[in-house]
Image: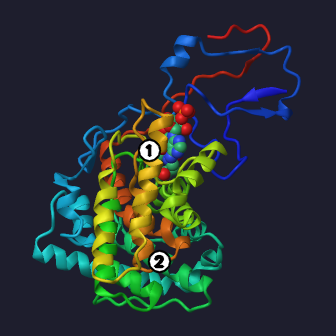
Amino acid sequence: MCVATLHPAIDQYKGFGASASRPNRINIDHCGPTSHITRMSPSAGEAERRTGGLEGVEVADTALSHVDGARGRLTVAGHDLEDLAGRVSFEEVCGLLWSGSLPDEAERERLRRAMAEGRESAFADLPRLGDALRAPDAMDALRAAVAHLRPQGHEPFPEVTAAMAVFAAAWARLRTGRPPLPPDPRLGHAADYLRMVNDDAPPAAARALDAYLVTVADHGLNASTFAARVVASTGSDLVSSVVAGLGALKGPLHGGAPGPVLDMIEAIGSAERARSWLEADLAAGRRIMGMGHRVYRVRDPRAAVLEKAVERLEEDGSARGRLALGRAVEGEAERLLAERHPGRALRANVEFYTALLLDAVGLTRELFTATFAVGRTAGWCAHVREQRLTGRLIRPSARYVGPVPPGSRPR
Ligand code: COA
């Protein structure tokens, strides 16, 4: 029996994200007899230097967004997130990411029309998607549906971005036995997405969802963006890059967290139960979803933006009051994590308040990660362009630690 450092799928979240210094270990029974094999193993010094999660490693130059993890600041193409979310539309942020500046009135109208046409064209494509949108999981459905896209041109950004909303909404309707609703080209992207899911889009909810899509449109070299850039670096097409991004986004350590955050808040039920519930969860070896971040050492600034948007919805009576409980759970989680990890700030990340916001606008949890994809596709497209401009294949190395043939010397 040999020991390998692989991900154990023991418990849904247990063991995910082990650090390089304390890797998750599982036993593998099928490695076969190994006594004759010389294995290459890292020296202690080398192991120290390893950053299996590439933390702190800069692998690209980007003009798209900057995550300042120490100060909790997100800059999107020269703008503070707080100056964009709730102030400009998702289409405008698409323009910002795809062209480098916020669109003027004529460009705004051109983008609005391009996205509306993209939604109509994606809706017309639905009959040729086979059973892609019948997959039980929204992200599996999106991945399969997007893979069918054959957009024209080198940079069909509006078409691919618009399609994500149409496919996500169609999936939501099909799973509840309702036929997909055609897009309304007069509406903004966020409002039309909400309407295609729920039949109508109250203005306050549509505004909050628009702020959400803006908030998640781009965020440095997160895992899904990196995946999309790796594919783009091979000279592959945009759709393949976006499909790679979807695969990475689906995981619970990335975009898969907000559904479980809502499950947690509901299971806790009242502020008084928060501490004991969270203690039991941690004692079971699980991570608290929506807490912690690879880069931020302070509270994720996106959490504050989304928290404010939920507060506005609750103040004007557009959403039921889950915010108080959410804040209480966040406070307890923060205190408990600080006790357990005094040297590492583990604060709320974007997913914590994503759960509350998407719930408040009337989307069900099965659609949360797919809705993240509706926004993040804008960033993936922009990164694909940026990566293509470098003309450089991303191809790192791995240190070989496996067996070597008898008689050969490990080097
Ligand atoms: N709950 C409990 N413990 C946590 C935690 C969480 N949410 N996040 C990190 N930790 C712990 C780790 O177990 C680790 O403990 P150890 O040193 O005893 O092994 C320590 O804090 C450092 O964590 P590390 O694994 O190095 O952090 P990371 O940079 O790899 O992880 C995340 C970042 C986001 C993957 C991680 O915080 C996490 O899993 N959060 C929950 C999932 C989530 O909300 N994802 C959405 C991200 S936007």
Mark 2 or mark 1: which comes first in sequence? 1
Q: Residue at x 38, y 80 (%)?
A: 319
* 405 w.r.t. 307: above or below: above
From where the camera sits, is residue 136 visible? yes
- Could you tell me if the residues under marks 2 and 1 are in contact, i.e. CB atoms within 8 Å? no
Numbered circles on residues, count: 2
Relative side of 32 to 267, left or right: right
Question: Where is residue 342, by image quadrant?
Answer: top left
Q: Looking at the image, what colour scheme do you see?
A: rainbow
Q: Position of residue 327 (x, y in %)?
A: 39, 60
Q: Position of residue 350 (x, y in %)?
A: 39, 56
Relative side of 346 to 32, left or right: left
Disc 2 residue crowd, few under 14, some 14–19, many 20+, Cα 10 Å: some
* 410 w.r.t. 335: above or below: above
* 324 w.r.t. 244: above or below: below
SS state under label 1: helix
Q: Residue at x 16, y 51 (%)?
A: 78
Disc 1 residue crowd, few under 14, some 14–19, many 20+, Cα 10 Å: some
Question: Where is residue 221, by image quadrant?
Answer: top left
Question: Is 82 or 157 nearer to us in this picture?
Answer: 82
Three-letter residue code for mark 1? Arg
Question: Is 258 or 345 nearer to us in this picture?
Answer: 345
Residue 335, label in figure: 1
Image quadrant in which the N terminus is located: top right
Image quadrant in which the C terminus is located: top right
Question: Is 262 or 278 nearer to us in this picture?
Answer: 278
From where the camera sits, is residue 230 visible? no
SS state under label 2: loop
Q: Position of residue 2 (x, y in %)?
A: 80, 26
Which residue was labeled with disc 2? 363
* 140 w.r.t. 195: above or below: above
Q: Residue furthest right?
A: 33
